[in-house]
Image: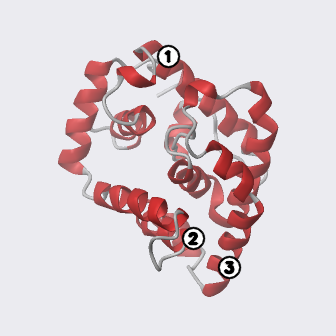
Amino acid sequence: MPASDVDRHPTRKELDSARRTFRKYESRDVFYRAATDLVSLALKGETSINVAEALAVLLQTWNRSYYRFHPATAQHFEALEAVLTKDAVWLADVRDRSIDSFGSEDEAALIATFDDFESVLGPVGAAKALHLLAPNFLPLWDREIARIYGLQLARTGLNGPRYVRMIRTVQGQVERLGGVDAVEGNPLKRIDEYNYCHYTKSWM
């Protein structure tokens, strides 16, 4: 499907349809819910699992293709922990923000953080991890969704600006839906369900 044919503004009715379809066919949604809770607990120090391990609950199921070629070794977790430490201040600042607050002043810091995570997790894993760390601020994507939206993923280190463009697109979608409070649940997750069902899997 050409990028020009993408429905840039799904309706709430379409999001509801996508949610029903997603729950019917995608059994891995339980890992998203588990990872969301584990990340929250890990950030508060209320579990023996650290943040990198909590992220891995989702990444090793939702990003399996990456781990076929990048084993989840101790060195991998150490690299992820190093990135989490490096970007801890910025991540704490955006943890509770919503996407409607994203502005041009956020772009440089986001690109730098995305590049750090991408170097360890690849462009798809980076977006998934960042979403779990700031679930109402940073959206998800996969390679097919990025392609459909005209953001064909490039080699590592070049995708940060593309992710900014994805954020701007999702920001516009949320605004068109009536804002973050007009959508039941997390609008970023709901839009990702729509994209995944419609474009990645062609279930709709």
Q: Earlier in the sequence, mark 3 or mark 2?
A: 2
Q: Are marks 1 and 2 in contact (CB under 8 Å)?
A: no
The residue that appears at 44% across and 19% down in the rendered structure is 7
Q: Quadrant of the C terminus?
A: top left
Tell me if 198 is positioned left or right of 54 in this view: left
Which residue in the protein does label 3 denote?
A: 78
Tell me: 127 left or right of 25: right
Please provide percent x and percent y for residue 168: 62, 26
Res 47 label: none
Image-quadrant location for residue 58: bottom left
Disc 3 element? helix
Between the C-alphas of marks 3 and 1, the distance is 38 Å
The amino acid sitting under disc 1 is Glu
Residue 127 percent coordinates (x, y): 58, 49
Task: Name the residue carrying label 2.
Answer: 52
Residue 203 image offset from top left, x and y in percent? 27, 38
Q: Amino acid at mark 3?
A: Glu
Residue 204 seen: no
Report crowding for label 2: few under 14, some 14 to 19, many 20 or more residues within 10 A (C-alpha). Answer: many
First reached walking from the N terminus: tag 1 or tag 2: 2
Whether the residues at callouts 3 and 1 have beta carbons within 8 Å, the answer is: no
Q: Is residue 125 visible from the viewing direction of this image?
A: yes
Name the element at disc 1: helix
Residue hosting label 1 = 175
